[in-house]
Amino acid sequence: MSKLTLILIFCLLLLAACETRVTVQEGTQVHMLTVQGSAEFEVFPDDIASVTVRVETKAPTAQEAQAQNAQVSDAVTKALSSHGVSGSSVETTGYYVQQIREWDYSRQKTVDSGYQVTNTLQVSSSELDGIGRLLDAIVQAGGLVDHVSFELSDARESEVKTEALRQASRHAREKAEVLATASNVRLGKAVSISEQSFNIMPYRAYDMVPVAMEAKAETAVSPRDVQVSVQVSVSYEII
């Protein structure tokens, strides 16, 4: 028998073996039960108050509006610094210059009414107990407070997510056991597990403070619980 013939026979044997394995895999059918598990709870914020601050100025010209905005923004920054907020905790998230156009009813047409400059700052403070004093200082310096949200530190968020996933997985197992019992089948091992969603919703505690507000007493803002929710999908083998 020639060497070429031996090689051809060997290749045919390998091909036959591959075809046999594919047939075996296709003939194996796994019956599964897929369920969704969820968990929702609240936790107290442990780290940061995030404050959205706006400085708005209006003037006949864009240059005047910008100059006024720079003055007020500087006053707000100094007020933040005097309350322990460093420059690294203040981030400019928006700066807009726009022409103001208003409807003139007497003339029945749109007229130019000057310019408005808006400077938006995101301020982070770890002094949760003193957040009311900080808001008062911002307003007295000429700023607007859109809202305050209380958040979790990275370490605390990691702990919370682990616990949420644990609870959601238990919930999925309980649902699967109920369905299996009702269907007169037994659950096997989990063959597929995936996280569908994980959400942390900070509590917004403060809405829109007018610039001209005269604070007679310190603004009272107390941290409240942060809402946590998670959903998982688990597939179990049915045996």
Image: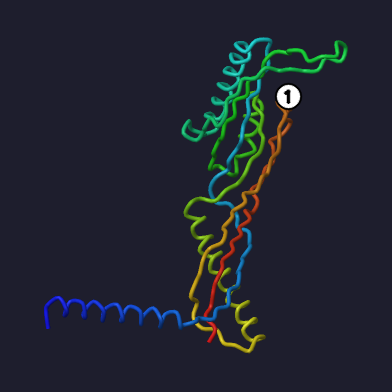
Q: Nearer the viewer, residue 117 or 159?
A: 117
The colour mode here is rainbow
Residue drawn at the location 59% of the way across and 29% of the way down: 120
Q: Nearer the viewer, residue 234 or 1?
A: 1
Residue farthest to the left?
Answer: 2
Residue drawn at the location 50% of the way across and 63% of the way down: 162
Amino acid found under the numbered disc labelled 1: Ala
Which quarter of the rendered picture does the N terminus lie within? bottom left
Q: Which residue is mark 1?
A: 212
How far from the left and from the top, in percent, is residue 108? Answer: 85, 14
Vertical placement of residue 98 versus 168, above or below? above
* Quadrant assignment, res 178: bottom right
Vertical placement of residue 219 versus 45, above or below? above
Q: Nearer the viewer, residue 74 or 189?
A: 189
How far from the left and from the top, in percent, is residue 157? Answer: 52, 55
Crowdedness near tag 1: few (<14), some (14–19) or many (≥20) residues, C-alpha within 10 Å: few
